[in-house]
Amino acid sequence: MNMKVLIANRGEIAVRVMRACKELGFGTVAVYSDCDRNALHVRLADEAFHIGPSPASKSYLRIDKIIDVAKRSGATLVHPGYGFLAENEAFGQACVDAGLTFVGPTPAVIALMGSKTAARQAAIAAGVPVVPGTQAPFGDDASDAEMTMEAARIGYPLVVKAVAGGGGKGMRTVATPAELLSAIRTARSEAGSAFGDSAVYLERRIVKPRHIEIQLLGDHHGTVIPFVERECSIQRRHQKVVEESPSIALTAAKRKAMADCAALVARSVGYTSAGTIEFLLDEDGKFYFLEMNTRLQVEHPVTEQVTGIDLVHWQLRIALGEKLTIDPAQALTPRTHAIECRIYAEDPDRGFMPSPGLVRAISTPSGPGVRDDRGVAAGFEIPVFYDSMIAKLVTWGDTRSDAIARMRRALDEYRVVGVKTTTPFFQWLTAQEDFLQGRFDTTYLDHLLATRKGQVFAVADAATERAAIAAVALMSWFRAHRAVTGAGGAGGAGGAGGAGGAGAWRQSALREGMRN
């Protein structure tokens, strides 16, 4: 089958999709901005095309440029990854209009489930319980009296949420009526800046909930298969930092009930491809529909390790019209326990501030039960323009304790020289007794961090210092070796790829990868 897939993304997810494509025998096309000219996803692709300056608004969010590259490269499928244009119905429609196969749900479904209020209505229509809240969003013309009255009906505490939001943006918690209107104004402003849509709605705040989500796959033949749940309650400021599967909070019966509800929602809207239904689980064991993500999730590897099913393979196969042949029992039966930590170029000792800069050396863990989905290599300069994720570190074992023990060992082995990372934070977190015992909810981490009062997470030990010295010495040797041999030459990394250009851009990327 002569297929070529354009990956409309960057970083570790672009690398992940490319690897799946190569395993299926599909050609791969990368796109890249100025600052990504020597990125790992560019080096691994069969072809790579420059699409603009570093700001995402001028490159990775330019639908016209990506469609143009797809046409010029001869790509037949477009995989959006996650983030950027992954949940943009206009992008999906542009692909369809250009005769390309979009690896995801239909544009109409993206639009429907991308609106949190419309998604709530879909869940209600499917008979799935939802968190009490407004039935329609508040537009800019909503009066203060109208919003105050609706908030009183729902009851406090409540949460103001952006209709088009995600990742904690456009979200504010409101404890009393006096806080309501200022919280709505702040949420609207943030949502308008982040998503181009300032509409918000209100939802009752469930105190100390767990955040549980159900992965699912749907094909074009009416089949929807739900998977083992993922536990995503370890969050900092509403953003997930640790995910695991299965959740120790669910019995087999509760898992089946939640999975059935997720499948009901997906079937009711004609969902195809990979998607995720998110739920909140309260202290009494009741669960409520929260929202749907119409794309592949960041944390999909934990589901793959727990079930043995490759979700990206199936995304591509579904896009080509194949019927799902997965055993539903296999998808809902955990064969192991898996945990994922998101390794970011951030300084946890400075409030998790981004730590952009040159990655001088990187040494990643391996061994039994370890998976490192990485989008960064030595010689790459982590830019300020995008999410600063370096990798997703996943470990698994027969029990949760085994998976945690492997995670701690893997974190000890992780070495990145040149930028700060969140590994010291995870080393600390995975040693906390409440984490080890599974006693947490979505508020746990923020409260725990507040108790530290600025205490540093880690002090470099002798082994870390020796590794840093050795890495710098090695890079100095490479510089000197190039100077003597003339390796690296001149030339830049701006190659456009395409016919006759693959060798040039690949050599350029390799040369750039050696620079520091």
Image: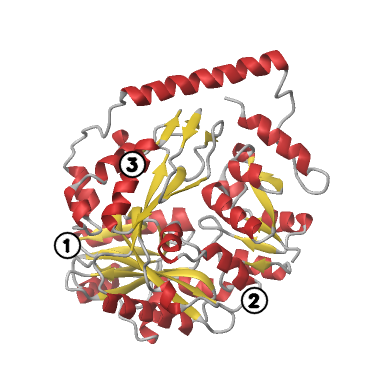
The numbered dot on residue 321 is: 2
Q: Closer to the camera: disc 1 or disc 2?
A: 2
Between marks 3 and 1, how big is the CA–CA gap? 45 Å
Q: Secondary structure at mark 1?
A: loop
The numbered dot on residue 194 is: none
Can you see residue 133?
A: no
Q: Quadrant of the N terminus?
A: bottom right
Contact (Cβ within 8 Å) of mark 3 with mark 1: no
Percent position (x, y) of residue 383? 52, 37
Percent position (x, y) of residue 110? 52, 71
Q: Quadrant of the C terminus?
A: top right
Residue 74 vertical position relative to residue 430 in the rendered view, above or below? below
Percent position (x, y) of residue 375? 53, 44
Residue 277: image quadrant is bottom left
Could you tell me the amino acid type at mark 3? Answer: Arg
Q: Secondary structure at mark 2?
A: loop
Instruction: Report crowding for label 3: few under 14, some 14 to 19, many 20 or more residues within 10 A (C-alpha).
Output: some
The residue that label 3 is drawn on is: 409
Percent position (x, y) of residue 309? 49, 66
Q: Closer to the camera: disc 3 or disc 2?
A: 3
Residue 292 vertical position relative to residue 23 in the rendered view, above or below? below
Between marks 3 and 2, how big is the CA–CA gap? 42 Å
Residue 100 vertical position relative to residue 130 in the rendered view, above or below? above
Horizontally, residue 302 falls left or right of residue 485, namely left
> Which residue is at 49% across, 75% downward?
112
Horizontally, residue 347 falls left or right of residue 428, namely right
The residue that label 1 is drawn on is: 176
Pick the front one: 242 or 408: 408
Between marks 1 and 2, how big is the CA–CA gap? 51 Å
Number of numbered discs visible in the structure rendering: 3
Outermost right residue? 500
Instruction: Report crowding for label 2: few under 14, some 14 to 19, many 20 or more residues within 10 A (C-alpha).
Output: few
